[in-house]
């Protein structure tokens, strides 16, 4: 039996304590704190995410049973339900958001050369939002509808590695398209979005920032054809046209030309119409790019199913954002470990192994290598398995 560090402690060694402390100091997180630091709070919440805890009492019970092991896990303060609840309520959620960005930067660097199925040199992002329903009585600040509350998780997903590069958490009433005003566009990058983001003024701002977009046209989009490009109908492309907005307001919002690609999906027997400002890529590649947008939908389904972001340990806005950001940190941390340790298992399998071995004192690589390397059936929902 190895008498070294627990699996949990080995996991946390992949995190930069120096960078975490910089985030804490930035917002005065440990001001007048003596026994239960922000790092202790992060470790407890990370434990809850990794072991699928259902509530504060659950966290308290599990950690108190293993009280003798807490020091070796890195948790120095006394863990109690009230202390953790208070920390989630009052300690600035931006500490954990900033630290998640540190991990995201590291993960994106590791996955920079990852193949996502298309031979592209440009960085490709998928942008979408997912709604997390909440109880109106418990979360009155999260405005959505008259009978229920909700928060929205707006995510810009880097398709190389499926790493969330930007996450913005708002109440449920904020329309998806408004998030385009909050994102700094990267010149040369391709942003893939659904019809909810079709706003000519904002799309033109993207064009002026030298970024490319691929989105779907709405049925009521009025566009005038300028000329048509030659096509090969065997690829599924039905037309490839240069167009411009037809009505006066749209012309003012987008005074330049657009490209319209009409594509027939043989598998789904569905005709799709795409709009883009990229005039160079082949028409069939525009359709393939839009198909990759589904990765952000898988990300939302995966993180909701395998981490704790639907049931919250606190009712305040600060507690909700803290929990979501720590969940994102754990997702990115597992992606980093997968890459650094050159593991072939899916994220789902790695999480399942970690959830039952956190207290063991086994070398991490040994613990993660015990299972046979095969394609997992997981929970009968294969499309939720990222990083196959």
Image (cartoon, grey):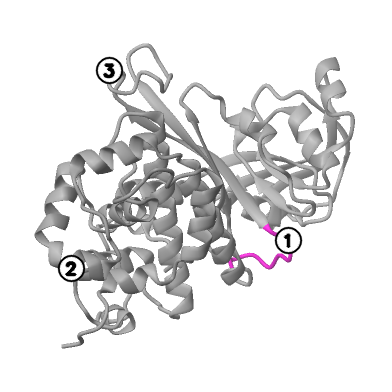
Residue occupying image coordinates x 35% and y 46%: 304
Q: Nearer the viewer, residue 233 or 70?
A: 70
Per the model, the C-alpha gap separating discs 2 and 1 is: 47 Å
Of marks 3 and 1, the one in the foreground:
3
**Mark 3 residue element:** loop
From this viewpoint, is residue 87 visible? yes
From this viewpoint, is residue 313 visible? no
User: Magenta region: which residues?
Assistant: 115-123
Read off the residue under disc 2: 69
Per the model, the C-alpha gap separating discs 3 and 1 is: 46 Å
Residue occupying image coordinates x 77% and y 40%: 206
Question: Residue 288, position in %: x, y?
Answer: 63, 55
Q: Main secondary structure of the magenta part?
A: loop
* Outermost residue, left side: 65
> Which badge, 2 or 1, comes first in the chain's sequence?
2
* Outermost residue, bottom side: 1
Read off the residue under disc 3: 137
Q: Quadrant of the C terminus?
A: bottom left
């Amino acid at each position: 039996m190895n008498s070294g560090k627990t699996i949990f402690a080995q996991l946390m060694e992949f995190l930069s304590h120096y960078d975490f402390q910089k985030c804490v100091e930035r917002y005065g997180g440990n001001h007048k704190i003596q026994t239960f630091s922000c790092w202790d709070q992060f470790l407890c919440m990370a434990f809850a995410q990794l072991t699928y805890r259902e509530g504060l009492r659950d966290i308290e019970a599990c950690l108190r049973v293993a009280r003798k092991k807490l020091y070796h896990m890195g948790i120095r303060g006394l863990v109690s339900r009230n202390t953790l609840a208070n920390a989630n309520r009052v300690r600035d959620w931006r500490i954990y958001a900033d630290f998640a960005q540190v991990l995201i930067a590291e993960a994106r660097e590791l996955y920079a050369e990852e193949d996502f199925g298309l031979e592209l040199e440009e960085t490709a992002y998928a942008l979408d939002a997912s709604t997390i329903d909440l109880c109106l009585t418990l979360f009155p600040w999260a405005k959505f509808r008259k009978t229920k509350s909700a928060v929205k998780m707006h995510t810009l997903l880097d398709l190389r590695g499926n790493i969330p590069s930007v996450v913005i958490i708002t109440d449920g009433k904020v329309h998806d398209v408004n998030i385009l005003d909050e994102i700094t566009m990267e010149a040369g990058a391709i942003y893939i979005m659904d019809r909810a983001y079709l706003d000519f003024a904002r799309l033109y701002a993207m064009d002026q920032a030298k970024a490319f977009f691929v989105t779907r046209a709405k049925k009521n989009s009025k566009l005038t054809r300028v000329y048509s490009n030659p096509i090969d109908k065997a690829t599924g492309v039905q037309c490839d046209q240069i167009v411009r907005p037809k009505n006066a307001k749209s012309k003012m919002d987008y005074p330049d030309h657009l490209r319209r690609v009409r594509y027939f999906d043989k598998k789904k027997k569905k005709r799709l119409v795409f709009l883009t400002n990229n005039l160079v890529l082949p028409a069939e590649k525009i359709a393939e790019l839009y198909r990759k947008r589904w990765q952000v939908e898988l990300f939302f389904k995966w993180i909701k199913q395998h981490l704790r972001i639907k049931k919250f340990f606190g009712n305040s806005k600060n507690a909700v954002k803290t929990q979501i950001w720590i969940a994102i940190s754990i997702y990115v941390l597992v992606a980093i470990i997968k890459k650094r340790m050159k593991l072939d298992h899916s994220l789902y399998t790695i999480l399942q192994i970690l959830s039952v071995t956190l207290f063991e004192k086994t070398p991490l690589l040994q613990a993660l290598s015990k299972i046979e390397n095969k394609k997992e059936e997981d929970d009968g929902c294969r499309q939720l398995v990222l990083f196959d």
